[in-house]
Image (cartoon, helix red, strand yellow):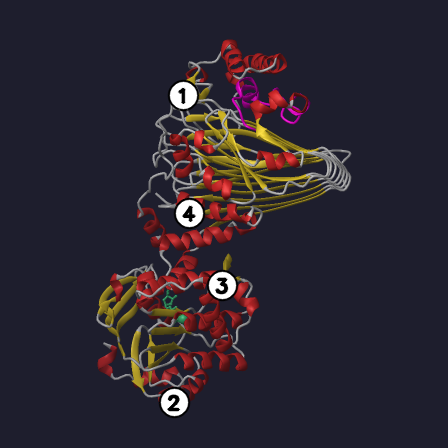
Amino acid sequence: MLTVKDLYVRVEDKEILKGINLQVNRGEVHAIMGPNGSGKSTLANVIAGKEGYEITGGEVTLDGKDLLDMLPEERAREGVFLAFQYPVEIPGVSNASFLKTALNEIRKHKGLEELDAMHFLKFMKEKMKMVGIDDNLINRPVNQGFSGGEKKRNEIFQLQMLQPTLAVLDETDSGLDIDALKVVSHGVNLFRNKDNAVVVVTHYQRLLNYIVPDFVHVLVSGRIVKSGGKELALELEDKGYDWVTNTVPAAETV
Amino acid sequence: MSTEVSNVEELAIKDYKYGFQTEIETDVIPKGLSEETVRAISLKKDEPEWMLEWRLKAFRHWLTITKENEPAWANISYPEVDFQDIIYYAAPKQKISLNSLDEVDPELLKTFEKLGISLQEQKRLTGVAVDAVFDSVSVTTTFKAELSKLGIIFCSMSEAVQEHPDLVKKYIGSVVPYTDNFYAALNSAVFSDGSFCYIPKGVRCPMELSTYFRINTSGTGQFERTLLIADEGGYVSYLEGCTAPMRDENQLHAAVVELVALDDATIKYSTVQNWYPGNSEGLGGIYNFVTKRGACRGKNSKITWTQVETGSAITWKYPSCILQGDNSVGEFYSVAVTNNRQQADTGTKMIHLGKNTRSTIVSKGISAGKSNNSYRGLVRVHKKAENARNFTQCDSLLIGDKCGAHTFPYIEVANKSAKVEHEATTSKIGEDQLFYLRQRGIAMEDAINMIVNGYCKDVFRELPMEFAVEAQKLLSISLEGSVG
Ligand SMILES: Nc1ncnc2c1ncn2[C@@H]1O[C@H](COP(=O)(O)OP(=O)(O)OP(=O)(O)O)[C@@H](O)[C@H]1O
Ligand SMILES: [Mg+2]
């Protein structure tokens, strides 16, 4: 479904991604791990279409469609969802009305009828229960005054509401206590099915106990230096990133 | 990185939605201003002698202050206004005594429909009475009968001069005397028409009262005069909405609005102003120089100004409150949006005279394009105003990097017991916020509107429900193709 081919990205003359290759198929969960500053968020942002990055080479496609050629909103309507590492606050805009607009934009794009207030509310109530988020957070302005954990939970709630085909979760586990971690993981697991795919960016093996990946990739200095199954995450936790950087085959570091 | 912003800048500038001119025969007094013009206006309106005298006094005063005294302190610039090149009176040529809407010129009705305020519709709508000013004469007034059962007088200023001379004589110029400023003097001399409203003792006006003004005849200056009086314990909520058709030359608009609240009375005055702002190069458009002032004359009285200003090439207005009665309250909630080459210099004055008087100012300025948006506010606490309180929140939002926002707060406190708080912020519309919304499938322009509307929430909340919706729509129209 998602194909990243030989992707090179620069920010202000600094090369951050240096030839990323990634193939994500329907029904799969991929984990991306790597040290701070290695380019994980950059990769997530470039997939979602954040501006300010210079793509110097390679391609990114979703079901064969060129994502790099689309505006962020077009990618979202095509089914790309990014759960942000740092969700922003939008004063004065209620979570509910924001989501109604977003959902209806996506539905319109898919040729579905827009939901009226009543049907939207009903749908929202179901999802709220699923993610364990209460009325109070829904009626407040988007993320405003939310605790770190609440913001992350809100991202997963939006994931459930918008039902994308590709979900990229950027450190959704950071700042969560153990109970919240379980709730959030549960939300992601409920989302998973044979028609969609999830890419989780994380520093911690712990999350992967709850959201079990099919593949784990290690990103160091803008390159995927090692890929494997879920046991790779355990090994990493055990041995640290030095272990991968040191075991990188000479050919790959060129 | 300013990639987001330059993207906004690329968006096309859309045409002013209300740019059209109605073909109706008009009765026009030739261009120019002299004592003869003033007499001619008064004669056309068949006014009593005292009204003509008042106009002439104002005119003579205006002559003495002449052009050198045209206010120059606002943070705006514009070519000189030639006062001899303005038509001071234009009335739609038809009889005004109409029994039903069927008798109204169909062209006129069409205009109202284009404006989205078809009177037919309005009549059916519950709870909104409309006194429509079309150019200079009130054409038709609805709901009058219902209101008069409660003793409420709601009519055109011309009619009030004829039918309720005592009230007019007593209150006109009592809040904004003709000596007040250059434009107030001019307005007093040549005012064409406007709305008059009187709420008797203890009466709560059961519906929102509303007036729509529209500048139509080419080269007409529009000089409305509005007078609202809420007697003891009275309550009224009033909405003024404006649109003007597209023009090549700039048009002057110099209205005067006077509010009087007696003991325990409350007046809410809401304005949605979208006069033609000129094209993207700043050509055409309305000069909006308005004097609006409310007097909280009685104890426990309250006046609330809420304004959403999206139009005009130049806006220069400071709806103010004189808090004379003890425990009286003045409020000012404002959203001012400027785009392209618009200039706005707006704010308020809160004059605390009575004891325990309170005022609140919430101002949201939004600048886009190459526009300039200034807040100018005065909070003055007089010696005898024990325990006066003011809270001011003054925020500016910038869209793009070619626009300007300025804040000029003036605070004068002569009583030690006063508490005056002022908070001000300036922010740029966040690229991260835009990306967040777009990542959820919301297009750029809609995302900007959503953020701006959220930003103005505190003000919109003060507007009557249906007008809040209209205000949001106007905001998106005026921000269409925001930055250029
Ligand atoms: N807009 C930017 N301007 C300058 N440098 C940037 C920008 N965005 C990213 N970088 C740099 O690119 C590198 C990769 O950043 P990125 O956020 O992708 O790392 P990350 O792997 O997500 O790190 P973390 O684990 O801390 O979240 C960092 O050195 C960062 O400073
Ligand atoms: Mg990151």
Numbered circle sitting on residue B111: none
Q: Could you tell me the amino acid type at mark 2? A: Glu
Q: Which residue is denoted by mark 2 in the rendering?
A: A235
Cα–Cα span, label 2 and label 1: 88 Å
Q: Which residue is denoted by mark 4 in the rendering?
A: B476
Cα–Cα span, label 1 and label 3: 52 Å
Estimate how packed mark 3 is, as few (under 14), some (14 to 19) or many (20 or more) residues with alpha carbons within 10 Å.
some
Q: Give percent across and percent down for residue B55.
A: 58, 15
Say if the magenta span includes residue B433: no
Magenta highlight range: B169-195
Q: Could you tell me the amino acid type at mark 3? A: Asn
Which structural element holds mark 4?
A: helix
Contact flag, marks 1 and 3 (Cβ < 8 Å)? no
Say if the magenta span includes residue B176: yes
Q: Which residue is denoted by mark 3 in the rendering?
A: A95
N-term mark: 2 or 3: 3
Contact flag, marks 2 and 1 (Cβ < 8 Å)? no
Q: Residue at 42% of width from left, 82% of height from top?
A: A189
Estimate how packed mark 4 is, as few (under 14), some (14 to 19) or many (20 or more) residues with alpha carbons within 10 Å.
some
